[in-house]
Image (cartoon, rainbow, N blue to C red):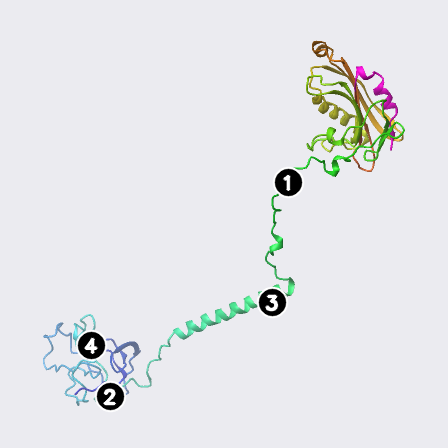
Amino acid sequence: MTTQTPAGWYPDPYGEPRLRWWDGSQWTDATHAQEPAAGAPQQPVTGPQAHGPDLQPPGFEPPSQGPGLRSPGSGPQPDPGWSATPANPTLQYGGPTYGQSAYGQPAPPAQQWGGVPLPGPGHGPPPRQGNPMPWVFGGLAALVVVALIVVGGVVLVNRGGTEPMAGPSPTDTFQPDPPTNDPPSNQPPPSQGAVELPQPVSGRVTDPQAGVSFEAPDDWTVPESSAINGPDPAQQKWSSGVQKVSHENYEGDGDWIGNVYAGVLNPIYPYTGASRLGDTAKAVFMNFGRYYRLAHESKIVEDKAMKIGDSDAWILQFELDFSKVSEENDYKWKKENGAIVLMDRGDGRRPAIVYVSVPDNLGTDVVGDVIDSLKPA
């Protein structure tokens, strides 16, 4: 039968001059400075101890292993009834023998109190090392609480300042119109001028859209709007006009005509005000040249400012010579006189344009008569 060595402070079994705590089952790392009892005689060191388990000084009685260690040469000690089994298992495997330090040097003698080693005077058990895990978990819990408080504060601020953003509703998504099988319309949109061009009244054509009026030459007729207006947005749109055929089927598939057309100037032409009417008129003339596909020579006859009533205007009059191609193909006309007139309408609006082009077989004075008849409408 074995008994358990009680926990307490005992002389260091490794020969150090201090006390080491025995926890009842093993030696611990807790140490304390050794304080000898008052009046206790100090045992002299008997000399170096031979190193090794079989080389002990004469008269040495090996003590039992464990906390109940005796000083060498002190004589027999009462048996405290402890087990002979070493209390510190490490002493079974090459640990320092009694009376030796950890490095084979003589160890100072251990103190005795009444023949039995007692705990060091005035010293209680070593302080217990607290388990750090509760502190770790407590710190993590505190961080979680702080994070929740911050998130809650942000949510409250956002709710107090703005309304929550709503997701897109089905009506926010563009839904294309289903395709239809209807053929495209040939009718011009409202911005391209009236579907029906105004007819002459007492020989005079009044264009309310362009804000201008003119005398229609004798025997000239008003064409269909679709005949002179196409779907191309870059093409000038006409809101009034009269025309007459100069040569029917001149190439076997079309008529060469004379015309007087009016409308609001197309936005493709630059216009910044009445002071730039001349520049705009030249831009229009250069673009209209593409309508005269037959070979010809052209020249500017007149390029100047004018007045239409009280409105500022500009006239660019020109002459086109088709004599060569006309003789080769036996056309009925040889030359063509024309004019481009722009009238400022004020208030930041686009100017009105009147375009006159008359082959010589329809009369050489028609252009002058139309220009002289212009009035604001």
Of the two numbered discs 2 and 1 in the rendering, the one whose residue sits closer to the viewer: 1
Of the numbered discs 3 and 2, the one sitting upstream in the chain is 2
Of the numbered discs 1 and 3, the one sitting upstream in the chain is 3
- Residue pictured at 26% horizontal, 88% vertical: 39
Residue under label 3: 156
**Decide: marks 1, 3 in contact (CB < 8 A)?**
no
User: Which label sits on residue 89?
Assistant: 4
Report x, y in % for residue 90.
Answer: 20, 74
Residue under label 1: 182
Residue under label 2: 113
Please, is residue 228 above or below residue 79 in the view?
A: above
The image quadrant where one finds the N terminus is: bottom left
- Residue pictured at 81% horizontal, 35% vertical: 209
Report x, y in % for residue 119.
Answer: 28, 85
* Magenta residues (range): 358-377
**Decide: marks 3, 4 in contact (CB < 8 A)?**
no
What is the C-alpha distance between the residues marked 1 and 4? Answer: 105 Å
**Decide: marks 1, 4 in contact (CB < 8 A)?**
no
**Decide: marks 3, 2 in contact (CB < 8 A)?**
no
Side of 46 where 275 appears, left or right: right
